[in-house]
Image (spheres, helix red, strand yellow):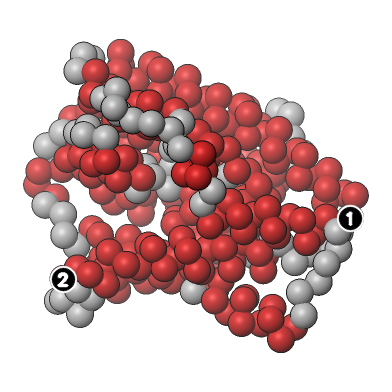
Amino acid sequence: MNFYNVFISIFTLFAIGIIGYLTRKINLIGKEMADNIPKFITHVTMPALIVSSMQLPFSWDRLGDVGGIMLIAIPSYGLQFLVAWMMPWILGVRNSWDKGVYQFMMIFSNAAFMGFPVLISIFGQESIFYAALFNLPFNALVFTVGVYLMEKGKSKFEFKSLLSPALIGTVIGFALFLFSVEIPEIALKPLTMMGDLTTPLSMIFIGASLATVSFKNIFSNRNLYIVSIFRLVLMPVALLFALKNFVSNDLLIGIPVIIVAMPVAALCAILAKTYGNNVDLASEGIFMTTFFSLFTIPLVVWIFTLVV
């Protein structure tokens, strides 16, 4: 893998993010538009990206890789749960609400909005086929364990919360792959073009989000520096070396490592707000890890290129 080419790809993503930042700063992108971008991504472009990326010829080797990536999800989430359990002790946090927020930060990364675009830039479109399947446990965990960490005892789990557009798109896309059903070109072309919007829109949204943040307040929280080190560097690098001993397929190593190396999921703030937890802390964690990821993602990718 040529690291220079990878660096150019990642730099391109962040250049788009800078455009999002600047256009929000000068109010070319207003608040309402910025708020609606993630809805458009999650309900339209992301499912289109997943379904179109899964239009691959069926093969038993590829099906074997599917089983492999889903097995790898177990130790990947296991590592994040272990660090999440230790994090309040590492930080010396005793407030039960803040504990839940910090633990959420350790378990749930921004796989879709940042992970998928980075994976495409490094491994190409086919990587989304495996990444979508690797990310299947996310919905089940975030709306069960995630809610448990955030809520104050007043929540009621609803099964429909698991049925996200991305999950539905993954199930449809995998079924089409499994039964070798090809989408007609007249439908596949617009679907693919719509899916291709996911990467630039995601980076524009992330840049626009950073434009409204007071960096002075965020960077005064010592605990968030520790969270960032674990979230963005230590966990993905530890996972990389662990998987290298058991997995020979570089793609199946790279996908979980890159996804684990992503910043805190945006749902951290959304669920904190919904269930009355510390939404300021959640938002600060998202923005700090997102900001630092501009530097740590190239670092993790560089380490990946050296190890594999």
Query: Is residue 109 among what the camera can see?
Result: yes
Q: Mark 2 packing: few (<14 Cα in 10 Å), some, or many (20+)?
A: some
Residue type, label 1: Ser
At horizontal 47% and vertical 44% (from top left) the residue drawn is: 161
Q: Quadrant of residue 17?
A: bottom left
Residue 166 location (% of width, % of height)? 55, 55
Q: Mark 1 packing: few (<14 Cα in 10 Å), some, or many (20+)?
A: few
Disc number at residue 44? none
Residue 223 location (% of width, % of height)? 22, 28
At horizontal 9% and vertical 47% (from top left) the residue drawn is: 216
At horizontal 27% and vertical 41% (from top left) the residue drawn is: 274
Identify residue for label 1.
59
Query: Is residue 11 among what the camera can see?
Result: no
Element type at mark 1 = loop
Assign the C terminus to one quadrant of the image.
Answer: top right
Count of numbered circles on the image: 2
Asked if 51 appears above or below 174 in the picture, the reply is below
Element type at mark 2 = helix
Disc number at residue 25? 2
Residue 119 location (% of width, % of height)? 56, 56
Asked if 16 appears above or below 3 in the picture, the reply is below
Residue 123 location (% of width, % of height)? 64, 59
Asked if 23 appears above or below 220 in the picture, the reply is below
Assign the N terminus to one quadrant of the image.
Answer: bottom right
Task: Answer with mark 2 or mark 1, whichever residue precedes in sequence.
Answer: 2
At horizontal 32% and vertical 67% (from top left) the residue drawn is: 36
Query: Seen in the image, is 131 located left or right of residue 303?
Result: right
Q: Quadrant of residue 277?
A: top left
Residue type, label 2: Lys
Q: Quadrant of residue 78?
A: top right
| In the foreground, 63 or 122 | 63
Query: Seen in the image, is 160 located left or right of residue 248?
Result: left
